[in-house]
Amino acid sequence: MAERSLLSVSATTLEFGGVSALLDVDFEVESGELLAVIGPNGAGKTSLFNCLNGVYTPRHGSILFEGIELVGKRPARIANLGIARTFQNLALFANLDVIDNLMLGRHHLMKTGLAAGAIWVGRAKREEIANRLICKDIAEFLDLDQFGSTPVGLLPYGIQKRIELGRAMAMEPTLLLLDEPVAGMNLEERNTMTALIQQVRAERDMAILLVEHDVDFVMAIADRVLVLNFGRVIATGTPDVVTVHPEVVAAYLGAG
Amino acid sequence: MSSRADAARVATPSMKLLPDKLTRMMFGLAVLIFLVTPLVLDDDFWMTVLANAGAFAVASIGLSILTGFTGQVSLGHAALLTIGGYTVGYFGADHGWPMWAWMLAAILIGALVGVAIGPFALRLKGNYLVVVTLALVFITGYVVENWTSVTGGFDGKSVNSASLAIGPVDFGELHIFGRDFSREQGIFYLCWIMVALTALVGRNIIRTRPGRAMRAVRDRDVAAEVIGVSNARYKIAAFAISSAMAGLGGALYAISLRFISPSNPAAELFLSIRFVAIIIVGGLGTIYGAVIGALLLGPLPELVQEFAGLFDFTIPIVDRPLVGDSPADNGIFSAASFSEILFGVLLVVFLIFAPEGIAGMIRRLRRRLAGRSNVDPDNVSDN
Amino acid sequence: MEKFFQLFVAAIALGGIYALIALGFVVVYKATGTFNFAQGGFVLLGAYLVYQFGDDWSLPFFVALILAMVVMAGVAAGIERVVIRPMINGPPFTIVLITLGVLLIIEQAVRTLWSEPAYVLTTPWGNGVTEVAGVSIRHVDMWTVGFATLVLGGFFAIFRFTTIGIAMRATAFDQEAAAAQGIKVGRSFSISWAIAGAVAVVAGAMLTSRTGSVLTPGLSFIALRAFPAMIIGGLDSPGGAVAGGVVIGVVEVMALGYLDFDWIGSGFEVVLAYVLMIIVLLWRPNGLFGTRAVQRV
């Protein structure tokens, strides 16, 4: 291949006490594309994200992001390289307001340390205001600016999902990992979220890797689909190719 | 657009120093009381009690940043006060350093000890880390008893000769507008000026990037790490800040008491628990809560001792007074036991029935006063 | 060499006491996930109860011991019910802080209820000594080791074989899941605290009846010295608590026996336990025998 992929995962295996959660997983994500990962429950989708993030360390294999090896790096370091993520079961900072949650997304883009922060006047204040302006724009874009200083833990589920997307956007990533962005949502919330994700893609230059159960949602939004079953990749390809792949059909019918 | 306009556009309560009019008024009132109290209450006992409370407030703000904002429990806080106390004893009294220098030394040595928790903060979680902070109490006690050239060993040491002067102002013998102030009054002013500065520093850290990171670590450590906030770094930072403030508080406390001597590890542990009680009763997640807690609970032992007479009414069935002034009174409680028990009871009762502390009660009261307001102050995120 | 054996016997006995104290912590931690700082207070109160029933009310020692165990079991379970249970679903460190408050209250309550500065506990073993191959072994030490073995064996049997033990393990692992399986979570909590209270009485009695020991409120301080034992062993492992206790006992006694205190200074043996703990933790963050927590996102 002449050009280097944005993310390239090769021969990655993750084990828990001798049981493989991921087995020899290989795939690539190109700049700007939306790759969806689907598979039955327990197929290893979230484990895969946890490996990319550095929450879990794979037993074998290599994960290269823009040519940099991610295996063995701490999650905070990986975030600094430009990988953002949302979580399956929401992981917002429940006692903080919307803006503070978004500001935390910009943590790695800011510089204020203890000394500058303690003094406040000058650099810390300037940086704080500049970044709050950016977060306010994101909040307006996601229709989140109405919630003021309410702790986000008290907001409805669908709103919290949107705040998580906002926090990930605030990180200005080159690769965005979305773990079940529409799970547990009603139809209206789902449509809003689908539109938002497409709008984000249109406005910002980032690749998206997303895990989702909802096959209709995936087929509507993804450039390519990767199917995991029992920790193995059983198919990759465009949505229409994958849906008719015999192993995929078997996995879904078998699981269903 | 001017930067002032930008600031107005993005300011939320969590970013402002004094978020609203009422807070500003209360702050003004507090400053007024601070200035006037020594003039009205010209009494050495009360001045010392209030100065001690100020020293405790400085240390409590530190613990509040560690526990309230970063979610880490420490039982070593008293050890850091001890370290601060000996720092002023050694550099201030023995070596005659000027005030700014021994204060800086107490802050820096405190911070260094806090950073020493670092490797553990990296590897240990929750309860294991708490016991490591307990180790600090034992190790400090051992060092204090045996490093006699610096600490004076079991005999302790006087800190009376430490300089209290900064520039032309000597807090040991203040003259303002032709009026002479006693040493106790001067130390009162000194301690509470330091409370204000510590609170300002604490609030500034909390409202900017490092403080936000600490709150993220407290609320969800793994998620914080995944979005780029290094848990280890901010836990260590919190320990460093908390310990630096405890060092400063300990130095001020020693100055106010004029003398410092070793106490056994159990007593140090109980002092640490008193600090925990102070921040819980005051209210976690606010700086002013720590100050209120220190003001109310800090002087408790001295007050119970002083006013034991109020509690010496006889309990009918056992026919003994509730609190004895002296052992000869045969009280059910000694004054010392009574105040310790009060700390324990207040800690448990607040944790169960009012976990948000007095700061939470104030929030609720304000909500009631605000009446029909749409904003629900009880649901305002911590700041 | 004789000195070594003599010290070794003393070390094992001290280790036995630390193990008994630590076992009380471990049973609560293993069954409920609660780190109970009040255990040191239970040990203190337990020892005073044995004195009250045995020496003050002149009950035979073992009757007094068992009575004290029953009372302490009730007190511990009561404390759990009143101040711990309501906070089970509260913020993570609330319960730890509550146990600290309880420790403060118990310690001062003991000072208040028993106002003399010190008492001497009368025991069947007294100051008896038996010579074995030139090494004199105190009877109290033999009893201590015996009790520690018995308690450890009991824990092992309870956790491994009884339904309530299995229920306790399940509760500690995941309260919600355990409740969903029909396990009475509350009962697991009560029983583990009651056991901790009863074990604390044994620990307190043995600690107080050591040769040269008297009953003072300062005992809870000695209980604090058991922390390194359970941390070294691993918080959730009864066997580890005993191993940790023995390690700390050996280190403390051998340090006292062999080190030159003019140079090292007083109180070094106490600090040594904590220093050892710190080294072990840097090497193995969950202690020697503790289970590693799985990180969940």
Image (cartoon, coloured by chain):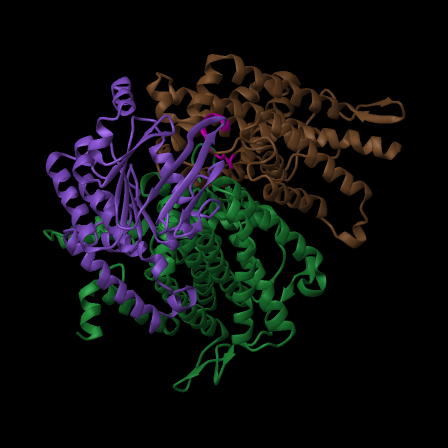
Q: Residue at x 45, y 33 (%)?
A: A14
Q: Does residue A200 appear to the left or right of A18 in the view shown? A: left
Residue B277 position in % (x across, y down)? 43, 48
Q: Can residue C95 be found in the magenta stretch? A: no
Q: Colour of chain B?
A: green
Q: Residue at x 27, y 59 (%)?
A: B14
**Quadrant showing the N terminus of chain B:** bottom left
Q: Foreground residue, C261 or B1?
A: B1
Residue found farthest to the bottom = B178
Q: Does residue B236 appear to the left or right of C128 in the view shown? A: left
Quarter-wise, where is residue C121 in the image?
top right
Q: Foreground residue, C255 or A144?
A: A144
Residue B320 position in % (x across, y down)? 49, 39
Quarter-wise, where is residue C85 in the image?
top left
Q: Is residue C178 above or below residue B94?
A: above
Q: Is residue B348 above or below residue A98?
A: above
Q: Does residue A108 appear to the left or right of A205 in the view shown? A: right
Q: Which residues are magenta?
A: C30-38
Q: Colour of chain C?
A: brown
- What kind of secondary structure does the magenta stretch mostly adopt? loop
Q: Which chain is purple?
A: A
The total number of labels drawn is 0
Quarter-wise, where is residue A27 in the image?
top left
Instruction: Mark yes or no: residue B272 visible.
Output: yes
Residue A88 position in % (x across, y down)? 29, 37
Q: Foreground residue, A209 or B341?
A: A209
